[in-house]
Image (cartoon, rainbow, N blue to C red):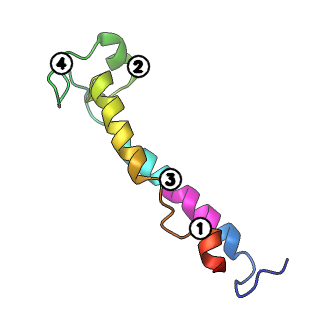
Amino acid sequence: MASGWARDGAVQEQIDASVDDAVGRARSRLPSGPGLLRCEQCDEAIPAARRKAVPGVRLCISCQVECDKADSQHESMNRRGSKDSQLR
């Protein structure tokens, strides 16, 4: 396949690196250690069912939703550059 100045396999390497980065970010956000009885942000009680379902939980559901929203706003940019930006 003709790919301009890129060497063979460069596109697949970029895809693999992007997937590895996403997996690393997801793993870094996984809770670890003992869970909390109360949310570390708002001090609301964390239900027993949530503590059982999410080992190491540190936030109540509403604080977790807000945290996830903030994280998703930062992930919209492809740090490695999109294919379109490389073609310009």
Quarter location, residue 66:
top left
Mark 2 or mark 4: which is in front? 4
| Residue plotted at (47% across, 54% down) | 76
Q: Over which residues does the magenta segment extend?
A: 14-21
- Quadrant containing the N terminus is bottom right
Q: Amino acid at mark 1?
A: Ser
Task: Give the class, few, some or many, for how many residues have Cα within 10 Å of label 3's Cα (few <14, many ≥20).
Answer: few
Q: Position of residue 57 (x, y in %)?
A: 30, 28
Kindly identify which residue carries mark 2.
53
Residue 82's mark?
A: 1
Farthest-out residue, left:
43
Farthest-out residue, right:
1
In the image: residue 26, left or right of residue 63: right
Mark closest to the chain's N terminus, 2 or 1: 2
Q: Amino acid at mark 3?
A: Ala
**What distance separates the C-alpha of mark 2 from that of mark 3?**
23 Å
In the image: residue 58, left or right of residue 86: left
Kindly identify which residue carries mark 3.
22
Quarter location, residue 38:
top left
Element marked by disc 1: loop
Q: Amino acid at mark 2?
A: Ala
Element marked by disc 3: helix
Kindly identify which residue carries mark 4.
44
Q: Position of residue 40 (x, y in %)?
A: 17, 30
**What distance separates the C-alpha of mark 4 from that of mark 1?**
42 Å
Farthest-out residue, front:
88
Mark closest to the chain's N terminus, 4 or 3: 3
Mark 4 or mark 1: which is in front? 1
Quick check: 19 above or below 30? below
